[in-house]
Amino acid sequence: MPRSTAGQPDVQMLTDDGAPVVVRRSARRRRTVAAFWEDGNAVVAIPASFTKSQEREWVRRMLAKLQRQGERRAGKPDRRRPATDEALAQHAAHLSRTYLGGRAVPTSVRWVTNQNSRWGSATPADGTIRLSNKLQAMPQWVIDYVLLHELAHLLVAGHNAQFWRLLEAYPETQRAKAFLEGVAFATSRGLSGDANQSAGTEPDATG
């Protein structure tokens, strides 16, 4: 349900190129405009006095700003990230113990270079997990979300309510989903610097 701010409900709309966005008008805002991710949605907050044409123009500008911010963050290296398959497997075991009670026990976890349509994949039958090496350019909390997503698939195959309850234990789930949605949005419109970047919004999506 759209949130109400200062008596004005949020408006969910599509931009001219089909991008979903929530427009939040506020009487408390006079000149400032802000954009941010909230519960997986791009939100643009504008003054209540803006005309429809001002609204369209600022939505366009602020969505572009969100995309640029996501690309800059994705390009920052993190020395703490698990760079080798062995380190990745050890990190997966740590995440399983911390968030899944140690119940997800993969037989192997490795980086791969041949996943262009998904961030990660898991095969419950043999307990293997594969993560796209493109994730190595992303923040650690995004990598952790994708890895936990695949670990959870070793316990629950589909994306049902039980599956998402498992991921509720990880505090960055919504933030990481929003980040990946932003990368997918930029990629689908040719705004990403990497033409081969995965466009899936979920780790094992085939977008």
Image (tube, rainbow, N blue to C red):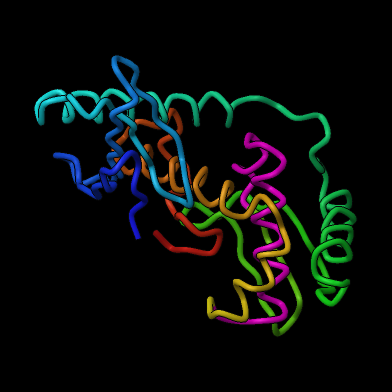
Q: Quadrant of the C terminus?
A: bottom left
Instruction: Judge from the rendering whether residue 53 lies leftward or rightward of residue 9; answer left or right.
Output: left
For the point 22% across and 29% down, the residue is 48
On the image, the x and y values in percent for residue 105 come to: 85, 74
Residue 25 is left or right of residue 134, and the answer is left
Picture coordinates of residue 165, whole percent (x, y): 64, 73
Looking at the image, is 65 positioned above or below residue 24?
Answer: above
Residue farthest to the bottom? 125
Please give left or right for residue 79 compared with residue 131 in the image: right
Q: Nearer the viewer, residue 122 or 35?
A: 35
Residue 59 picture quarter: top left
Q: Quadrant of residue 200?
A: bottom left
Give the farthest residue toward the top.
Answer: 31
Q: Nearer the viewer, residue 117 or 50?
A: 50
Q: Position of residue 21 (x, y in %)?
A: 29, 44
Locate residue 176, reporting x and y percent.
Answer: 58, 48
| Main secondary-structure element of the magenta-colored stretch | helix
Is 145 magenta? The answer is: yes
| Horizontal relation, residue 140 to residue 92: left or right | left
Of the pair 13 and 107, the residue shown nearer to us: 13
> In the image, what residue occupies the spot 66% across and 54% down?
145
Give the residues in magenta: 132-158
Quadrant of image for the N terminus:
bottom left
Eyeballing the image, is 27 above or below 81?
Answer: above
Question: What is the count of numbered marks?
Answer: 0
Quarter where residue 60 is shown: top left
Residue pictured at 45% horizontal, 33% vertical: 194
Q: Is residue 36 magenta-colored?
A: no
